[in-house]
Image (cartoon, rainbow, N blue to C red):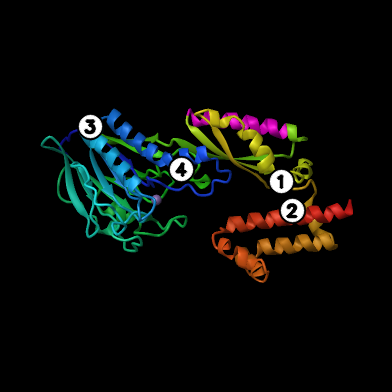
Amino acid sequence: MTACQPFSFIHCADLHLDSPFEGLHALEPQIAAILRDATFKAFGQVIDLAINAKVDFVIIAGDVYDGADRSLRAQLRFRDALRRAVEAGIECLVAHGNHDPLSGWEAALTLPPGVHRFGGQQVEHLIVKRGSEPLAEIYGISYPVREVRDNLASQFQRQPGQSFHIGVLHCNVGGDPHHDNYAPCTLTDLINSGMDYWALGHIHNQKVLRDREPCIIYPGNTQGRNVREAGPRGCYLVRVDENRHLQTEFVATDVVRWYTQEVNIADLNSIDDLLEVLTEILEETRKAADGRAAILRLTLVGRGELHRQLRHLDPDRDLGSRLREGELNRDDFVWVESVQNRTRPPVDIERKRQVQDFIGDFLRAAEALRQDQHPAALLHKLLAARPEHTLIAKYLNKLTQEDWLAMLGDAETLGLDLLLEDQE
Ligand SMILES: [Mn+2]
């Protein structure tokens, strides 16, 4: 194998610029504004990294924008960031995905020279050079429309040539059930293409599917957008040496980081104790976020006496507001998104479930629902018979199986609490 020029590049994906950040429970206008800007700032950090690390090119593997009808603001700011890169001599290669297919609305903005956008008809092939020296051969394709059900990976074929070959694709490898099955393909399809590196996009959690020959990476999104996207988010900095060996490094680019934390109340005796523990968690979160802002969801769990006290208050309103005090005055704020209460009364539910009385019947009915093959469908059916159904129907379809089971647990606990109250 002949030696090649060492080079480096950045691989990012799923920028979701101008994402609306759904589901922020206690929305403070100031927090909303910071979040609204976070996807742009995160991409700004990608470009800063590209410039500081003096990389040769930046790959963006789809879902630049959050919606097909991208905002003009998003388009302009994306172009501004790309311009900063090309002015520093860094080429940018962009593929579009299911959130921002080529069919979506777009203003007639001219992209700066040095930015290449892959078309949607066939896999395009181009060579990135340093001066007249070829560094890498890059193959890519964009989604012409939102729902691409074809296996696009199988259309990638290495061209003859000694340099380093990179495939850029927004796709679902191996049918990940948590993401839409667009451009489905298998790991074997990717390996058989003859690429040296696969710059993938679509899966929002960072994932190295294979570390060499070829290296296959989902970098995850550059900024978490909700509590399901907790933890560090960023991009990959890839260095290729003269023997085509590569070194990959994940670099966080998120400006606001999401956290979730469960707090067991079993050993806590008072609201004071609880507040102390929650405050400690808040400070630990601040430390972990390492200077950036954080959004924290706290979930109270476990069985204990404190459950009865918590029933008399609204944990989110009463505890959450206390924890949020003063946070808006600092840059490294930890904003408590919500305090969710999933605590249970200090009784042996399993034992009560065995007793042949009304409470036992109630608990057995709840358990039968839980153990049903399709608990969500069954609960849905029960609710459909209620007059309130017309009001809530549109929300029910958005619930996941976990949401249904959590609600069933809440209902079981509330029912048990009320029944036990009668006994006491
Ligand atoms: Mn995406």
Residue 136 image label: none
Q: Which residues are magenta?
A: 273-291
Q: Up-down: is 373 above or below 205?
A: below
Instruction: Determine which residue is flagged by label 4.
Output: 224
Q: Amino acid at mark 3?
A: Ala
Q: Nearer the viewer, mark 1 or mark 3?
A: 3
Q: Is mark 4 within 8 Å of ligand 1?
A: no
Which is more N-terminal, label 3 or label 2? 3
Q: Disc 3 vs disc 4: Cβ atoms closer than 8 Å?
A: no
Residue at point 74%, 53% (across, down): 413
Which is more N-terminal, label 3 or label 1? 3
Residue at point 67%, 42% (across, down): 317
| Label 3 Cα neighbours within 10 Å, binned few <14 / some 14-19 / many ≥20 | some
Disc 4 element = loop
Would you say residue 374 is visible in this rendering? no
Residue 343 image label: 1
The CA distance from mark 1 to mark 3 is: 55 Å
Which is more N-terminal, label 4 or label 1? 4
Q: Residue 211 at x, y = what percent? A: 35, 42
Hey, which quadrant is residue 252 in on the image?
top left
